[in-house]
Image: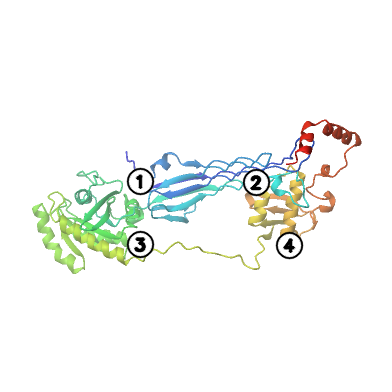
Amino acid sequence: MTTFVDRVELHVAAGNGGHGCASVHREKFKPLGGPDGGNGGRGGDVTLVVDQSVTTLLDYHHHPHRKATNGQPGAGDNRSGKDGQDLVLPVPDGTVVYDKDGNVLADMVGHGTTYVAGEGGRGGLGNAALASARRKAPGFALLGEPGKGGDIVLELKTVADVALVGYPSAGKSSLISVLSAAKPKIADYPFTTLVPNLGVVTAGSTVYTIADVPGLIPGASQGRGLGLEFLRHVERCSVLVHVLDTATLESDRDPLTDLDVIEEELAQYGGLGDRPRVVVLNKIDIPDGQELADMIRPDLEARGYRVFEVSAVAHLGLKELSFALAEVVSKARAAKPKEESTRVVIRPRAVDDEGFTITEEDGVYRVRGEKPERWVRQTDFSNDEAVGYLADRLSRLGVEEKLMKAGARAGDAVAIGPEENAVVFDWEPTVMAGAEMLGRRGEDHRLDAPRPAATRRRDREAQRDDPQREYDEFNPF
């Protein structure tokens, strides 16, 4: 059973933001000391990070559901909730991230490269943060936003300098085992190699990596055999080495035909035409193999290939091959453009961008935009004051004015958000968003209402008998 997995579907979910707290400060002789509700904590992110010590996606194959922790809700006395802990998922170098529709989200190459697969939700503001000169004591708080997530596909494409390509049983695994310290499975039957094998080769001052990938057969570019697994891992390699079997026991095969078949599959897969090629004639330790190598070498050189005759079993021609590959790899590295430092791309919002759009769909006016949709998610619809606050925000943003221009009338259905989870309500055109109806929205009228005479008298008597009051009067500092 193989322990190598190079393609998995991962279900990620970021943490939800904690809810804000609606609280009023209370202490002796100050029953209404003002709002002191704290903010909710931020939900944790789900982040993918390239880790050189990770070589497979096997762990995510067995455990595909990953979720970050939620933020904690706020509390009274201005105590903010704890932020959720970020979830960091290590992935191999060369991992490509796709969405469920097959669109590329990130191409992760290089140690330490990160990608936020799920962004944690914002914490809701407490009523202390919502207080203002006109809203002295809000009786509500904002809800925390849900964390983002969904299904993503991780696909590993091996990052190596040299890729050994060829028919099954051409000797690729034997060759990588003698060129490097890699120990792949070697046997005398086809498709011995089921997963890519990586090895490190040192030739003089040049150190490069070499990959042995599953064998290729006709039709591999359409998924026949292990072709797609083969081609996926060849895609990132800088140099391609054709390993040709000069001692094949199959009567209908010969090295030149094998080379043509492989090149045809590479061309159909696409994107590999610019890679330098080297041809290795393997198994020259067998008399028939050496004889066939001598016959076809002039034809290969006439095609423009650099040809090397080797024997992985007898260790013939390996030194020349390793140094020649080091030379080709060095040239390929020098030809690559230098990586630029990280650039920050700033995309300012257009001058005429209102931050939302309104469209009519079957008699329903749909409002879409980052701010309106976020405000809806933060609103506690069981609290009338919170709903009024949402109406005020939408009015200030210009939603009501634009609804009027779009032809909306009283009683028309208005939906905020996408179709699958929109908030729908019957619109009542009030430009002031009901401010006249609710008076000074968000204020606690108990702070300004006169207290009964008996209550005031009881408080004065209690203050007279309070020893702390006497201490404070004689010790002002």
The disc placed on residue 402 is 4
Q: Amino acid at mark 4?
A: Lys
Q: Residue at x 74, y 60 (%)?
A: 403
Q: Taking 219 as reference, is 369 left or right?
A: right
In the displayed orientation, state which residue is furthest to the right: 453
Name the mark nearer the viewer: 2 or 3.
Answer: 2
Secondary structure found at label 4: helix
Q: Upstream in the sequence, badge 4 or badge 3? A: 3
- Write down the residue under mark 2: 124
Q: Taking 2 as reference, is 349 left or right?
A: right
Placement of the N terminus among the 4 image quadrants: top left
Secondary structure found at label 1: loop
Closer to us: 111 or 137: 137
Closer to us: 167 or 460: 460
Q: Amino acid at mark 1?
A: Ser
Crowd around label 1: few <14 · some 14–19 · many ≥20 (10 Å): few
Residue 473 image offset from top left, x and y in percent: 79, 38
The disc placed on residue 53 is 1
Q: Amino acid at mark 2?
A: Gly
Name the mark nearer the viewer: 4 or 3.
Answer: 4
From this view, report whether residue 131 is shown above or below residue 268: above
Q: Upstream in the sequence, badge 2 or badge 3? A: 2
